[in-house]
Image: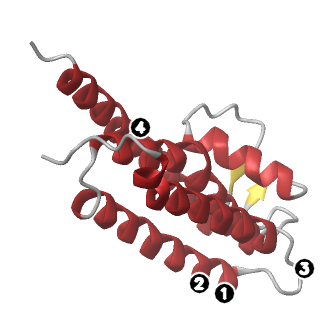
Amino acid sequence: MSRKPTTLAEWKSTLLSAAGMVLASFLAWFGLSRLSEATAGDTIGTFASIVLFIWIVSQSWFYMTQVTSPRRLLFLMGVSFIQVVPFLFAAVYGAFGYNDNCVIGAEGPGDILYFSYVTFTTVGYGDMSPTGLCRGLAVSEAVTGYILLGLFVAAAVALYARNHEK
């Protein structure tokens, strides 16, 4: 069992890791969701989907094997749940392009990001819907949202239970 991180110096690597994930996901979304219609499409979208899959697997491995502090794990999972994963899925949707190539009703990067958060949280308002290859991507995003939320809640309960043992 590892000691609780209490100082900023002990949290430095975790905060840098979280900041790096946030920056990388924002840049991916910013860049890929603004591709021209001539550039975006199935090839770029499929490549972005593969990179997203590799990222999710590598992050899952990292969380399960390398992060030993429950507090750090909970923090990193929270950052992933709130910002990183929805932004990366939005980047992939944007890589497929607009004009109803991926998400029917999406007209720009903001719409794609909105659709990603609605899908990730499984709210599903119904004002936009995926089409083509993006239907499978939307299903995987919803499943990822379920799994990540479940892991986050389990980690929070375990941390609470550990801190309140008698």
What kind of residue is marked 2?
A: Phe
> Which callout, 4 or 3, points at the residue further toward the start of the chain?
3
What is the CA distance from the residue labelled 2 to the residue labelled 3?
16 Å
Kindly tell me whether residue 145 is visible in this rendering: yes
In the image, which disc is placed on residue 149?
Answer: 4
Kindly tell me whether residue 147 is visible in this rendering: no
- What residue appears at the point 54 percent right and 61 percent down from the top-left corner? 16
What is the CA distance from the residue labelled 1 to the residue labelled 4?
31 Å
Query: Is label 2 in a helix, a strand or a loop?
Result: helix
> Which callout, 3 or 1, points at the residue further toward the start of the chain?
3
Query: Is label 3 in a helix, a strand or a loop?
Result: loop
Residue at the spot of label 2: 47
> Which callout, 2 or 3, points at the residue further toward the start of the chain?
3
Q: Are marks 2 and 1 in contact (CB under 8 Å)?
A: yes
What is the CA distance from the residue labelled 4 to the residue labelled 3?
34 Å
What kind of residue is marked 1?
A: Thr
> Which callout, 4 or 2, points at the residue further toward the start of the chain?
2
In the image, which disc is placed on residue 36?
Answer: 3
Q: Residues within 10 Å of mark 1 (few under 14, many from 20)?
A: few
Q: Nearer the viewer, residue 66 or 43?
A: 66
- What residue appears at the point 90 percent right and 55 percent down from the top-left corner? 107
> Which callout, 1 or 4, points at the residue further toward the start of the chain?
1
What kind of residue is marked 3?
A: Ser
Residue at the spot of label 1: 43
Q: Residues within 10 Å of mark 3 (few under 14, many from 20)?
A: few
Where residue 39 appears, x then y in whole percent? 83, 86
Q: Are marks 4 and 2 in contact (CB under 8 Å)?
A: no
Looking at the image, is mark 2 or mark 1 nearer the viewer? Answer: 2
| 33 shown above or below 54 | above
Query: Is label 1 in a helix, a strand or a loop?
Result: helix
